[in-house]
Image (tube, rainbow, N blue to C red):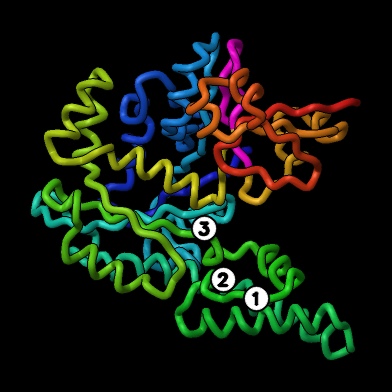
Amino acid sequence: MALQCGIVGLPNVGKSTLFNCLSNAKAQSANFPFCTIEPNVGVITVPDDRLTKLVEMCNPRSVVPATVEIVDIAGLVKGASKGEGLGNKFLANIRETDAIIHVLRCFDDDNITHVDGSVDPVRDKEIIDYELLLKDLETVESRLNKTQKAAAAGDKTARMQVEVLSAIKDALDHGRPARSVTFDSVDEQKFARELFLLTSKPVLYVCNVDDDAAADGNAYVDAVREAIKDENAQLLILAARTESEIAELDTYEERQEFLAEIGLAESGVSRLIRAAYALLDLQTYFTAGPDEVRAWTFRRGSKAPQCAGIIHTDFEKGFIRAEVIKYDDYVTLGGETPVREAGKMAVEGKEYVVNDGDIMHFRFNV
């Protein structure tokens, strides 16, 4: 499931430093690797204590963690929506991603020049927002002009589309992203998604702070939090420089000691990876046994046949039933056999909505 988060930000905000931290396997886990599939795309493992526990219990011959793709998007300048600088490439790359990680500089450092001469994360956010809004407005207005003609001719579907487009246009005209507009009907929601607007993508704002503010943030972070309160977006605080130092340590134990010394339970990179996974609306189910323990990625709300199809299309086509063990039962009772003996294994049909952490066996016939 190749869903991607794109990292965006102005120059010198810590975007590249953060991507380099993500690209270093040592920053995430003692055992699971990072790989590069393109110069600016990383496939990054998702830290998950549940997987680690299952590996301890099963001692499998192989382990496959869940992953998420992170894309380092080309830099942006004012006028990107009109093709200035690398604007066209920047916007095209964002359009291809499924979610946005927007890095904002929230630290003072006279040795690192800000592109606009001063530190103001809210202003920086608005620069990128403005370019995305302008591009979306261009898209919506063009589509609206075409659709209004069909609506005037009595096309009911076109009338619905005009209402959706008009609502989004009104938000964009007032400086609000498309994701701030919600729709009631399934048809309206589907049409809005199919517009593939830049500002409709879910966003995680990453406030890059200095070491002293890594735990609780600072005034810059407070300003960002206030600015995004009506956006339906998330916020995460980390210190990219500290993350770079963690990434340079050789062992998992050294990294844990370093984190303990600075008062953090886990690295910001680990929190960021999990946040990116959630931002994409992804969850995990497991298959576990002596041959392999594996984390399988699925979209929240997927039913059992769809999740079976992630393993192989034949599993979905010939789906009969799913045997489901809850993770807590598996760990508490000591594995699959004790769970079966205790009558805790559920047998589910085609309408079962898979839960995060389920341990699954699929029965099928093709």
The CA distance from mark 3 to mark 2 is: 10 Å
Q: Residue furthest front?
A: 342
For image coordinates 67% across by 33% down, the residue present is 324
Which sits in the foreground, 330 or 176? 330
For image coordinates 77% across by 85% down, the residue present is 148
Read off the residue under disc 3: 91
The CA distance from mark 3 to mark 1 is: 26 Å
Read off the residue under disc 2: 136
Choose the circle earlier in sequence order: 3 or 1.
3
For image coordinates 66% across by 29% down, the residue present is 343
Judged by its main secondary structure, the magenta piece is strand
- Please state if 256 lies on the left or on the right of 158 as rendered: left
Q: Amino acid at mark 2?
A: Asp
Residue 344 magenta-drawn?
no
**Horizontal and vertical percent position of residue 318:** 87, 31
For image coordinates 35% across by 20% down, the residue present is 30
The boundaries of the magenta stretch are 286-298
Read off the residue under disc 1: 183
